[in-house]
Amino acid sequence: MSQEFLPDDNKFARPNDGSAAESEQDVVCVTVTGSPQGVRETILTLYRLGFAQVGDWSPVQRAANPKQVMSVLIRRRKRKA
């Protein structure tokens, strides 16, 4: 049973399928969690600062705390050498 928790050394290996461009990108996830009003205001503030478009964020979803919600922004960026 403990074998299932061992790291899989091949999980990052990819077949040569032409996905080299994909491997040159980082994926960054930004999560905002809090009250519904706080999450909306934070997303609008980040928009005003030029960080991300409002429509780039996921729809607001329930968070683990029943009084909170969350929204996620996923960004892809080129890796720097």
Image: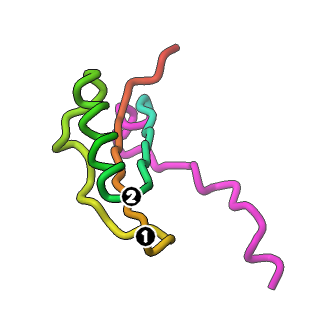
Element class at badge 1: loop
Q: Main secondary structure of the magenta part?
A: loop
For mark 1, what is the residue?
Answer: 67
Question: Which quadrant of the view contains residue 63?
Answer: bottom left
Task: Please identify the quadrant where the N terminus is shown.
Answer: bottom right
Determine the CA span between mark 1 and mark 2: 7 Å
36 on left or right of 81? left
Q: Are marks 1 and 2 in contact (CB under 8 Å)?
A: yes
Residue closest to the far left: 55
Q: Amino acid at mark 2?
A: Ser
The secondary structure type at the circle numbered 2 is: loop
Place of residue 39 in the rendered image (x, y in percent of width and height, measured from the top left): 34, 50
User: Residue at left 30%, top 53%?
Assistant: 37
Q: Determine whether 78 is above or below 53 in the image.
A: above
**Seen from this angle, which residue lies furthest right?**
2
Q: Is residue 21 magenta?
A: yes
Other-residue count near label 1 (Cα within 10 Å), few / some / many at <14 / 14–19 / ≥20:
few
Please, what is the three-letter code of the amino acid marked with disc 1? Lys
Q: Residue at x 28, y 60 (%)?
A: 60
Q: Position of residue 81 (x, y in %)?
A: 52, 14
The image shows residue 41 at horizontal and vertical percentages of 29, 42
**Which of the two residues, 32 or 80, is positioned nearer the viewer here?**
32
The magenta region covers 1-23
